[in-house]
Amino acid sequence: MLDPAFLLAQCISGLTAAMFLFIVASGLSLIFGVLRVLNFAHGSFYMIGAYMAWQITHWAGANSVSFWIAVPGAALAVALLGGIVERLCLRHLYGRAELYQLLFTYALVLILGDVARIVWGTQQLTVPRPAGLAGGLEVLGIVVPHYNLFIIALGPAIALACWLLLSRTGTGRMVRAAAYDREMLAALGADVGKLYTLMFMAGSFLAGLGGALVTPVRSIVPGMDVDIIVEAFIVVVIGGLGSFWGTFLGAIIFGQVLAFGILILPGFSIFAVFVLMAFVLVVRPAGLLGRAVKR
Amino acid sequence: MKADPLARRIPWAVLVFLAAACVPWLGSRFYTFLATDIAILALLAASLNLLLGYTGLVSFGHAAYFGIGAYTCAILMKSYGVSFALGLATATVAAGACALLFGAFCVRSSQIYFSMLTLAFAQIVWAICFKWNSVTGGEQGLSNVPYPNLGWMSSLPVLGGLRAGDHYYLLVLILVGLAFAVLKRIVESPFGSTLTAIRENPERAEFVGINVRRYQLAAFVVAGAFAGWAGALFGIFNRGVFPDFAHWSKSAEVLIMAIMGGIGHFWGPAVGAAILILLNQQINAYTQYWPLILGLILIILVFVFPSGVFGAVHSGLQRLRRHRHA
Amino acid sequence: MLSARDIRKSFNGFAAVAGVSLDVPAHGITAVIGPNGAGKSTLFNLLTGHLRPDSGSVAFEGRDITGTAPYAICRMGIGRSFQHTNIFRKLTVFENVRAALIAHAGQSHNFWGRSAQLYGAETAQILNSLGLSDQADTVADSLSHGNQKQLELGIALASNPKLLLLDEPTAGMSATETREAIRLLERIVIERKLTLLFTEHDMDVVFSIAQKIAVLHQGRLIAEGSAMEVRANREVRRVYLGERQ
């Protein structure tokens, strides 16, 4: 008989993982929705966000506020990096075949991975949990760290904030228009160039934010960029490329499959996730909430 | 290459093949090792190009079929004592069969979804290699894969003095050469023209009476089978098979080889494979930051030589010719 | 020869084709006219299998082809061109037509023959009849717009169709080009004993060659008949010709 406390623990750990993933993957989805570029370097931005968070807490010293400076600081630094990449390079590839955009972002993965290795070395780095969230909450005999609860609350808050921005602001409307029909954008009189830069920065911001937030629970290591990008791809593809709520749904499904896959097929949870992705794509080629996009 | 009539009349492929056959007599174990590596990966890259350059399908999971070929042949030869010829044939068929199974789903999606689906299936293959300890050896892979019995080569007059590695290299060279000849024949056939038409305009291709999905699937199977052929050869060359063979980073590496050489030309990917492997060797001797260098090379490639080395040389020659005529 | 029975197609609640029945008589020239957005291209896509009608049926030579895949419809003997010129852009003019000939001959699965040795004469003959022989080795993308339209016609002819559907064959052409293209078209239809169904925005063209005209307006057929009958139709004058005068 399965222990309800164990099930709850699995569910919560799955949900925490899902919210981290959602924060990162929503940025990937946003960029794809508007720019139609599948950004391999998104995971690298996440990694840079984590390293930047470590760096800022390191500079700020061990005090109760350093983490709360580090998180937005790291996310902004990554957004800036994203802006530079878009303006200097990616911009020149929009008219070209998809393959070259992918190749370029893959080149960034290689470069940023080594740059991080040169700057921060190959040793594991850790960031302590922020002072206010170091404790835990006891439910059914298991202890759920406060930080995990914070993340589980933060995920939907970010989702809601993004959704409000997308549905209530003029820029948001353009973003949604772009996701359905690119040609409409220019017809609406949008400054497409500016919108692209802005969205790439916003997407990168989310990647950096995810990277910074994850530092108290996972150590920062080289290779974390590649691990997350594969997971984020799966989440976005399951939910439907460019679909915002699809990404949210995809992340939750991913987290639960990962958490409970261990029960059914021990050691095969990666396998389960790829099977899930293949299954979703076979049944619904555009993802769960995706629509066939007009090019 | 349509550079000029003289260059076209020289049978370049045959010359390169003959030159490659001389490598064992350079006497260096290392050169033979490099040449084997290049020959096999050149074939893998060329098989990917059947999809990429000829059919217009971007597969992110081509290494899966390479891995399936390598594992099939290695398991048969090591665990069941099957002969090399049968192992190679079975590996090719197995890779083609898996390509048929996965491809049937993949070709139903287009563009980026096609790519993601090929990636998903490839990662499933990788996960199976990684976890199915009793058959694939799991994370550690299978080592000590036996060499085929090439003792008969020692009794031949010219080949007698060579090492076992050299003998295997010559076998690889013949088998890869054969595969290239068949591939070349395929791309120049009506089937190849059909694939090119699909690449150029699937909608129009459909309305000259081509069942587009079926031909995309056929290309996927043929490419998968050749990848399996290359994989079987590679597993034995490597004396072992590992989950990495099927990993997506391997698929990315092959994709880069193909694009680096130039996907617009039959020999482009093979040239790309040679360049990438040689560069890797050279640069690894100086620095551990090979990914950084590769990333910079890719950026130059994307912005300066988008049609690859072959494309750049081709347009360079054309410009030169126009200059001479002017 | 081709007949549509009450076919309908809606996109997100917008009825692009709202119940059209149309008969295309054999060996004749039939035109579908109508203002922009009347549903002409949707109608064509329904006839050739690119879209599946929500209801209604399409029959070709007495066989029901509703829901049949485009490639299969093409093989039955229907050729078509598209409104946005649809050719194999990076292939040469010669290769464009040859690719279509290979498909028509059922050679697509032949992976051991040599394309270079196949259908040279047949390709040359088609190019010759279109006046494209001089450009055989030109890459299709660098042809003039008018020549690209002709090339697309050549691709369609390569599958030796009995029925040819042309979507705006003279779109984007100058007056002179249009006249030449129409003369060419008329000649080919007679030579090959084709049935032609086409859409067109140029009324002079339509009235000069079409034996039967169908007028589409807001997804419905509002008139059908000879040039004279259509010209005389009050409804047509109101919704269509009225816009012009």
Image (cartoon, grey):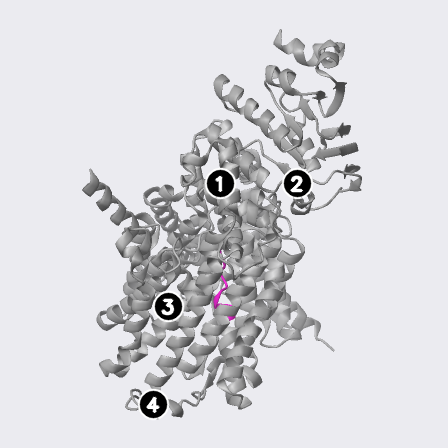
Looking at the image, which is closer to me, A32 or A222?
Answer: A32
Q: Identify the residue shown where x is 66% and y is 40%.
A: C50
| Predominant secondary structure, magenta span | loop
Mark 2: secondary structure: loop
Residue identifier under label 3? A125
Asked if the magenta segment contains residue B45, the reply would be no
Mark 1: secondary structure: helix
- Residue A196 in view of the camera: yes
Q: Which residues are magenta?
A: B58-65
Residue identifier under label 1? C124
Q: Which of the marked residues, 2 or 1, is nearer the chain's N terminus?
A: 2
Residue identifier under label 4? B156
Residue identifier under label 2? C50
Name the residue type under label 1: Ala
C73 vs B120: above or below: above
Q: Chain of mark 4?
A: B
